[in-house]
Image: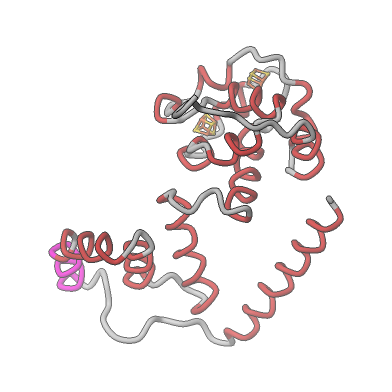
Amino acid sequence: MAGAETATYDLGFAKWVAGNISGADKLSMCMQCGMCSGSCPIGTQMDHGPRKLIMMIRAGMRDAVLSANTLWNCTQCYNCTVRCPRGIPVTEILQGLATVAVAEGHAGGEPTARFSEAFWWSLAKFGRTDERLVTSRFYFSAGLAEGVRKSRENLAIALRMIKARRMHLGAPHKIKRRKNLQAILAKAREIEARGAGEGD
Ligand code: SF4
Ligand code: SF4
């Protein structure tokens, strides 16, 4: 039927999550009590609350789980984790799923994911976050028109920050021995890739 929604199911997804996401080996203990969703301060701003997301993992709804804004709207307040009667580290699991969502291309449009990318770009390049470059990279990650619109919208704020010496002009601040930082990050990526391979 035209326009009808279809869901795809990956029946091995729950097992994969349990074996590859930190803390998710405890997911089988979830009794669907809803304490996590009931405790979540921004559950109304999520596509699916944490309880439902766990049910979807079990059902094998891989794409729907990895595309859910739940992963990005979670503020990591840990309410769900400390209140779960089964000791399931819900927050940690959501963070792990967000990393997978980025790696598999499900998070492109999410502002939090785009901001995170801009933040890490600056950190890896300079060893510091340059607020001007992070902000402009974030703005333009949504496209040229959106970048120009957001830049214009916030120009007055930027000028006030420069005047108050809260934002500097000139070259970005950089740490010394950036090559050492980049070698550490390269090693961390290598270890992460090795770990991902072992989990296959
Ligand atoms: S609070 Fe814990 S046991 Fe209850 S639904 Fe959430 S994750 Fe499952
Ligand atoms: S950690 Fe995230 S999912 Fe858990 S209660 Fe806080 S905002 Fe909600």
Residue 70 in percent (x, y) is at 51, 35
Give the residue drawn at x 39%, y 72%: 130
The way the protein has been coloured in the rendering is secondary structure
Height in image: 88 above or below 62? above
Give the residue drawn at x 78%, y 29%: 26
What secondary structure characterizes most of the magenta part?
helix
Give the residue drawn at x 56%, y 28%: 6
Nearer to me, 26 or 143: 143
Examine the rendering and report whether any part of residue 88 can be seen. no
Magenta run includes residue 104: no
Magenta run includes residue 162: yes
* Location of residue 64 (image quadrant): top right
Q: Residue furthest top?
A: 33
Residue 5 in percent (x, y) is at 51, 27
Q: Which residues are magenta?
A: 156-164
Q: Residue furthest right?
A: 198
Residue 17 in percent (x, y) is at 75, 38
Using residue 196 as the reference point, say whether residue 42 is left or right of it.
left
Using residue 119 as the reference point, say whether residue 56 is left or right of it.
right
Height in image: 198 above or below 135? above
* Location of residue 160 (image quadrant): bottom left
Height in image: 134 above or below 197? below
Give the residue drawn at x 44%, y 57%: 114
Examine the rendering and report whether any part of residue 2 can be seen. yes
Residue 135 in percent (x, y) is at 33, 65
* Location of residue 166 (image quadrant): bottom left
